[in-house]
C-alpha cells in the first residue's frame, strides 16, 4: 500500500489534467530556481564591483587616470562595466566631451553630464530588475494553479465514487492524494520565488540608493571642476578706451602773423 501511495505512483496515476498542472508547476519551479541562482551571482558581483570602485574613486586618484585605468582593465578582461562604475564613466565621458566644445558654458556641460548619469542609472535599474517580475508571477500564481489541480482531482475522484455501490476510504484516498500533490507542488514553486523576490527587491532598492548618492557626489565634483576651468572674465577690468586726439586749430599761444602794409 505504501508503494502504491508513493509520490511517483500518485503522479503517474493522476488524470491528464492534473498531470498537466503538475508539469507546469514543475517547469515553473525549475526556471525559478535557475533565475534565483543567476540573480544571486549577479547581485554578489554588483556589490563586489561597487566596493572595489568606491575604494578606487575615493583614494584621491585623478578622474582622467581612473577613466583610462578602467578602460584598460575592461579591454584586458573583456568584461562590461556594471553598477557605479558605469554611471561614473557615462557622466565623465559626457563631461569631457562637452568641455572640449567651444562656446559651451558650464551649465550646459553639467546638464549633459547629469543627463548621461541618469540614463546610465536607469539602465542599471533595468538590468537589476531583470527576471524579478517572473519570480513575482510564479510566487503569486503557483498556489492557485496547484489549487486548481487539487479541485479537479477531487472532483474526478467523487465522480468515480458515483459508479461504486460501496465507497470506502481505501477507494477515495488515492484520488484525493493525487490531487493534493498538485497543491504541494504549487507551494514548492511559490515559496522560494516569493522569498527570492522580496530579498532581491530589497537589494535593488539598496543599490539604487547608493547609486543615487554617488551620482550626487560625483555631480558636485564635476561642478567644481567646471567652475574652476571657466575663465574668470568678470574679474578682469575692462580695457580703457584710447583718448580721442584733440582737434587741430590755431594755437592761441602762438603770435599772429603781421600783415605788411
Image (tube, rainbow, N blue to C red):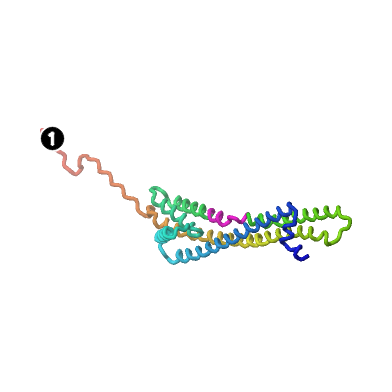
Residue 9 position within the rendered picture, expressed as x and y whole percent measured from the top left: 73, 60
Whether residue 63 is visible here, answered yes or no, is no
Q: Nearer the viewer, residue 30 or 135?
A: 30
Q: Quadrant of the N terminus?
A: bottom right
> In the image as oriented, which residue stretches furthest toward the top?
261
The residue at which mark 1 appears reads as 259
Residue 231: percent from left, percent from top: 37, 54
Look at the image and give the residue range highlighted in magenta.
122-133
Viewer-side residue, 119 vs 32: 32
Residue in the foreground of this view, choosing between 35 and 3: 3
Circle 1 packing at 10 Å, graded few (<14), some (14-19), many (20+), is few
Residue 64's image quarter?
A: bottom left
Q: In the drawing, does residue 245 fall left or right of residue 178?
A: left
Residue at 41 percent of width and 54 percent of height:
96
Say whether residue 101 is left or right of residue 220.
left
Was residue 30 drawn as part of the magenta stretch in this picture? no
For residue 125: magenta?
Answer: yes
Amino acid at each position: 500500500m505504501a508503494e502504491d501511495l508513493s509520490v511517483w505512483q500518485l503522479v503517474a496515476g493522476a488524470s491528464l489534467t492534473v498531470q498537466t498542472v503538475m508539469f507546469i508547476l514543475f517547469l515553473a519551479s525549475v526556471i525559478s530556481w535557475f533565475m534565483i541562482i543567476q540573480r544571486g551571482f549577479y547581485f554578489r558581483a554588483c556589490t563586489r564591483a561597487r566596493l572595489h570602485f568606491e575604494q578606487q574613486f575615493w583614494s584621491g586618484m585623478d578622474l582622467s587616470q581612473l577613466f583610462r585605468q578602467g578602460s584598460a582593465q575592461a579591454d584586458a578582461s573583456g568584461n562590461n562595466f556594471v553598477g557605479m562604475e558605469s554611471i561614473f564613466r557615462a557622466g565623465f565621458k559626457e563631461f569631457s566631451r562637452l568641455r572640449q566644445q567651444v562656446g559651451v558654458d558650464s551649465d550646459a556641460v553639467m546638464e549633459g553630464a547629469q543627463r548621461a548619469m541618469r540614463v546610465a542609472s536607469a539602465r542599471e535599474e533595468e538590468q537589476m530588475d531583470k527576471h524579478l517580475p517572473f519570480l513575482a508571477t510564479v510566487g503569486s500564481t503557483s498556489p492557485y494553479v496547484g489549487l486548481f489541480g487539487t479541485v479537479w482531482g477531487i472532483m474526478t475522484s467523487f465522480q468515480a465514487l458515483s459508479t461504486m455501490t460501496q465507497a470506502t476510504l481505501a477507494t477515495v484516498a488515492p484520488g484525493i492524494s493525487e490531487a493534493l500533490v498538485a497543491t504541494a507542488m504549487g507551494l514548492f514553486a511559490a515559496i522560494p520565488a516569493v522569498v527570492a523576490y522580496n530579498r532581491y527587491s530589497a537589494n535593488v532598492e539598496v543599490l539604487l540608493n547608493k547609486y543615487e548618492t554617488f551620482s550626487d557626489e560625483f555631480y558636485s565634483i564635476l561642478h567644481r571642476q567646471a567652475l574652476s576651468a571657466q575663465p574668470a572674465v568678470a574679474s578682469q577690468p575692462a580695457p580703457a578706451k584710447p583718448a580721442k586726439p584733440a582737434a587741430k586749430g590755431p594755437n592761441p599761444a602762438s603770435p599772429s602773423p603781421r600783415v605788411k602794409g
